[in-house]
Image (spheres, rainbow, N blue to C red):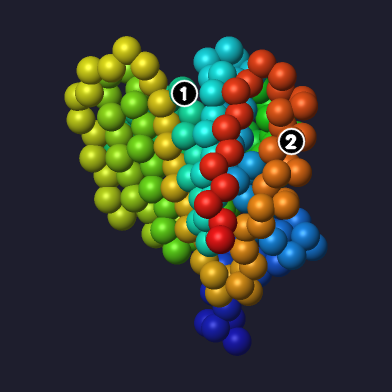
Amino acid sequence: MEDSIRALEVGEHIRMRPKMYFEKCFSENSLDSLPFEVLCHAFDEYFDGNCDEIELTVWKNSFSIKYNSGMSLEKYINENITKAEIIMTEIRACSNLKKHLAVGQEFCGLGMATINFASDKCKLTTVWNNLKGTFEFQNGKTIRKNIESFLSEVSWTEILVQPNNLLFENLHLTSKGIEEKSSEIIKRLKDLKFIVNDLIE
């Protein structure tokens, strides 16, 4: 009996029990809350005065966010992993890696890693301190990465997410839900330029 007991990795547990983690999606019968969870790093940078523009593009089964602040490409504690990868693959809710813990209470109930684990594909591109990092993830794990010199006067980050359709039982993004949630952000963060490109058919 004991030999058959196996400890599940976090990603495996998320994929086995999606309703436990994504209660809001299943209660709202849509994926509309996911983009705003992924925006937790952008909101963190906004509260720190480093981000004042966010562009959200939504399709029926995927979404991308782009904002004018970079993710750190610094190596984390003498390991061969960047802080950007830590944010994308290990932070499952608010943590002390965030500069503003209130971001977790308000905007980061899940963490980017949780959504990454529940996605077929996820891609991160970020420009930070004259470096450009491009990362591809599958089932929450890094499968490709490239960091190169990239002279730029501005920093920015773009994240593309394609949630796993089977895990979410064919839930989709909806125009109505995205508009409602975007309007709430615009009302609350008045000096943030929030652009929504609705490409849902």
x, y percentage for residue 90?
Answer: 51, 45
Residue found at x 33% / y 44%? 135
Is the residue 145 above or below the residue 41 in the image? below
Residue 106 in picture, x, y percent from top left: 75, 34
Q: Nearer the viewer, mark 1 or mark 2?
A: 2
Q: Secondary structure at mark 2?
A: helix
In the rendered image, residue 103, in percent from the top left (x then y), is placed at 68, 30
Residue 170 in picture, x, y percent from top left: 61, 72
Placement of 167 over or under 161, stated as above or below: below
Amino acid type indicated by mark 2: Ser
Residue receiving disc 1: 68
Compared across the picture, whether 22 is left or right of 65 comes to: right
Relative depth, front residue between 164 and 56: 56
| Residue shown at 32% from the left, 17% from the top | 129
Asked whether, in this view, residue 160 is left or right of residue 176, the answer is left
Say which residue label 2 marks.
183
First reached walking from the N terminus: tag 1 or tag 2: 1
Amino acid of disc 1: Asn
Residue extending furthest toward the bottom: 1
User: Mark 1 and 2 residues: CB-CB less than 8 Å, in contact?
Assistant: no
Q: Residue at x 57, y 52 (%)?
A: 114
Q: Residue furthest front?
A: 201
Q: In the figure, residue 91 lies in which quadrant?
A: top right
Residue 121 is marked as: none
Tell me which residue sits at (56%, 56%) in the image.
200
Q: Quadrant of the N terminus?
A: bottom right
Whether residue 17 sits left or right of residue 74 in the image: it is right
Q: Can the viewer see residue 200 in this picture?
A: yes
